[in-house]
Amino acid sequence: MKNKINQFLLGILWLLAVTLGASFWLNTVYGFNIFSASHWEYLAYMQASKLPINQTFYVSVIIIILLAFIGLYALIRPRLRKFNKNLFKHPVNTKVNVITDKTASALETLPAETQSSPITQNNITSSLSRPPRLVLPTLKNDVSLQRRDSISKSNQSDTLTQNSSQEQNISEIKEIFSSAGYSVKSNTKINGIQTALIAIGANENLWIGATGIKTTDLRTMIEKLEQIFADTLEDIYINVNGFVINAIDASTSEFQDILMFNSVSELEDYIKGVPNAPIPDDEKEDFEAYSQYIDTVINYIGKM
């Protein structure tokens, strides 16, 4: 809707500019004022009386009309936003392991340098003079080992519980955004940190969230996404919204643009107030192209 209003205003501005230009040209060259009714009456009288009229006058009028229509078409013609999905097929940073001649020569000479020294009678005698000492584990050591095993099993159990709780939170977060009308994408790691949600909405909006991390880490992830958008898109701005649940630095965070919640239920209450706007029929093709572009970015950034 906002784009249509902008196009309407641009069309009016263009017509005003063409009208003023035509008035200046016709008044200067032919002495004809297009805003004067008497001039139009005199022109009609000359045409009816078949009086000679400068042919370039008609040519100028035709050119002005053509310019007006061509300019209007250029301003209000439908445009499809183009998202280039082929920019990420070949990773930018590729590492190639090259074995130089120096390395190869070092590998070839390694066996010769590490050959064992000749076995002598003295070596045999010294190796047999002191047999290896047998040390049996005591009861104290057995208790320590059992205690370590119990601690290790307890830590593994806590880790599994935390992972299960995190997976449940991620599932609930996805359901919240899906119910609010957003298109939920697959999660990926950015800068080695697992995201809890990546979702897109109308008007090139993107949501990214995580749980139990610092807001500074999320800000770094957003900046990385924005850098990719800036490098691969022209004249298209993607608004990135970020949130963290149970942020580690919640009490000291200085980022005003990153939302912080204490629980998934708080996030749900907030998202209910900002659901995704419905996509008009004439913008569904643009949204599909936008969705495919984000899929390509997620696939690319996950391999970095």
Image (spheres, rainbow, N blue to C red):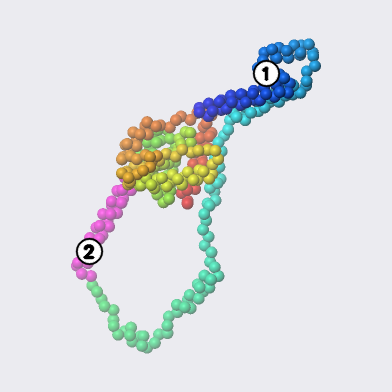
Residue 211 visible in the picture: no
Identity, as a three-letter code, of the amino acid under mark 2: Ser
Q: Closer to the N terminus: mark 2 or mark 1?
A: 1
Say which of marks 2 and 1 sits in front.
1
| Neighbours of disc 2 within 10 Å: few (<14), some (14-19), many (20+) | few
Residue in the picture at 53% in, 26% down: 5
- As for residue 67 lying within the magenta part, the answer is no
Identity, as a three-letter code, of the amino acid under mark 1: Ile
Please give the range of residues in magenta.
137-166
| Neighbours of disc 1 within 10 Å: few (<14), some (14-19), many (20+) | some
Report helix, strand or loop for mark 2: helix
Q: Main secondary structure of the magenta part?
A: helix
Q: Which residue in the protein does label 1 denote? A: 34
- Disc sitting over residue 273 in the figure: none
In the image: residue 143, left or right of residue 272: left
Q: Which residue in the protein does label 2 denote? A: 144
In the image: residue 31, left or right of residue 238: right
Residue in the picture at 22% in, 60% down: 147
In the image: residue 222, left or right of residue 166: right
**Depth check: 37 or 288 in front?**
37
Residue 110 visible in the picture: yes
Report helix, strand or loop for mark 1: loop
- As for residue 155 lying within the magenta part, the answer is yes
